[in-house]
Image (cartoon, grey):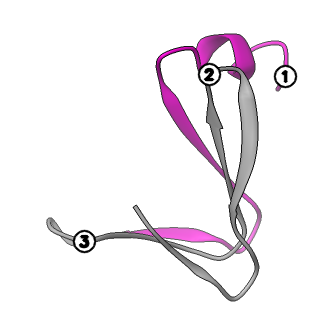
Amino acid sequence: MEDIAYPDSMNKKFYALVDGSYVYLDGSTEKIYGKAYLIANGQITKISSTNEIFMG
C-alpha cells in the first residue's frame, strides 16, 4: 500500500477503511462509521476509531 497509495495521494485524498467499517451517503450527508484512516500528501492519519463516526 505504501508504495502505491502514498505517492498517489499527493494533492488527493484516500479513505482507508478497516473490515466492518462503512461509508453512508445520502446526497447531502457523508459519514464513515468505524475505524478509518485518511491518506493524503504521502501521509496516513487515523480519523476515527471503532464505534465512532467521522463526518466528512
Name the spot of residue 55 as percent of width and height, x first.
42, 70
Q: Using residue 54 as the reference point, say whether residue 31 is left or right of it.
A: left
Which marked residue is nearer to the observer: mark 2 or mark 1?
Answer: 2
Q: Using residue 13 as the reference point, say whether residue 46 is left or right of it.
A: right
Label 2 residue SS: loop
Label drawn at residue 41:
2
Q: Quadrant of the N terminus?
A: top right
Cα separation between marks 1 and 3 = 30 Å
Q: Quadrant of the C terminus?
A: bottom left
Magenta residues, as a range? Answer: 1-24
Q: Are marks 1 and 3 in contact (CB under 8 Å)?
A: no
- Give the amino acid type for the residue marked by disc 1 in the picture: Glu
Name the spot of residue 34 as percent of width and height, x first.
66, 76
**Residue bearing mark 3:** 29
Label 3 residue SS: loop
Name the spot of residue 4 as percent of width and height, x first.
75, 14
**Residue bearing mark 1:** 2
Name the spot of residue 15 as percent of width and height, x first.
58, 46
Q: Quadrant of residue 19?
A: bottom right
Q: Are marks 3 and 2 in contact (CB under 8 Å)?
A: no
Instruction: Give me the residue at 21% from left, 72% from top.
Output: 26
